[in-house]
Amino acid sequence: MLQLMQQYVPGFSGKPVSYRNYHAYQTTDRLYVIIPARTDQDSYYELAAITVYMQEAGFPRLAQPMLTTDGQILTVYENTAYLVVEMPPPYPRGLDAHGAELAAFHQLGAGCPFAPDTLSSYGKWSDLWTARLSQAERLYSNMYQKRPLVHEERVFLDTFHYVIGRTELAIQYLNETSNEFRFTDYDQPTTVFTKYGSELADTYVLPHNIIYDHPARDLAEFTRTAFCKKEEGETAEFLQSYMQQRPLSVFGMRLLYARLIMPLHLYDQMEKGLTGKAYETLIMQQSKYEQRLSGLFDRMQVDAHTLEIPILEKYL
């Protein structure tokens, strides 16, 4: 890995360390983190431009992708492409509520002077979900022909029609939402995360999972994680503190709802593999998940009936 770093900083030397399970190097005043690349170079050039903008606009905690001495953003080392990011120097953090902090992050990102192309998923959810369903159907078809089956595979086969039903429902709801006319400037694309957990609660933010999409994506993925846990914790406070700073339109609320109907957490686990109990555990938790989803708008202090927001029961 030291040879890799020397392609960015000639004569580089530093202490090898680990940072969030990534290889990293610590120097006297800097930390460099080495992250396996998951996409093409064009996406990372866009990412580098976004991080420069975000830092200059008032979010200094975001690490900056580096360029090699040859101007390349990715480096291949032992047959794997890597992105290297430079962590910013330490600085005191504010103590904003988590939801409010995410709202401020989205507000900065919405002001980006250029619109990313390869990094954008805005308006593409239906196609992406349809593609994931097709991939899962191929897995089902192949497994259906297999004999003998282990327990985890049988659980998958027995529950996959439920996954299909929920996916088709989510896509239908999403497509109908595209006709929703009650939207605001807050519905413009902005900087979000592929799957937001609590990255903004960390001292530093690694940029490799940042993309360009509707802000409802981050709200949905944070809420999904909470709904999948035994305790929901701060969901209501998180959503309300966000909306106090950056209110969701009816269009945004419907996108949030559609994304939570879509069982993306089940797809994620399918793609990780069906060995072990993880998929079965998630399936067993689905009744609780859907119970919590039915109370989503109450948690947001939103009257779905008055706003004429379609709710799940009317689709069943």
Image (spheres, rainbow, N blue to C red):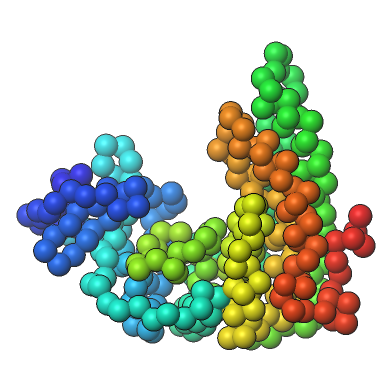
Up/down of 41 relative to 95, above or below = above
Up/down of 131 relative to 51, above or below = above
Instruction: Compare residues 5 and 71 and report the one nearer the observer.
Output: 5
Residue 226: image x %, image y %?
62, 59
The reply, left or right, for residue 180 in relation to residue 241 is: right
Residue 244: image x %, image y %?
62, 85
Q: Quadrant of residue 144?
A: top right
Residue 45: image x %, image y %?
37, 64
The reply, left or right, for residue 269 in relation to residue 178 is: left
Residue, x 32% and y 49% (percent of image)?
Answer: 22
Count of all numbered marks drawn on residues in the image: 0
Q: Is residue 134 visible?
A: no
Residue, x 80% and y 76% (percent of image)?
Answer: 180
The reply, left or right, for residue 38 in relation to residue 73 is: right
Which image quadrant: the C terminus? bottom right
Q: Quadrant of residue 266?
A: top right
Up/down of 8 relative to 252, above or below = above
Q: Is residue 225 visible?
A: yes
Instruction: Compare residues 135 and 217 and report the one nearer the observer.
Output: 217
Residue found farthest to the left: 11
Which image quadrant: the N terminus? top left
Residue 185: image x %, image y %?
64, 86
The reply, left or right, for residue 225 in relation to residue 104 is: right
Instruction: Compare residues 179 and 29 and report the one nearer the observer.
Output: 29
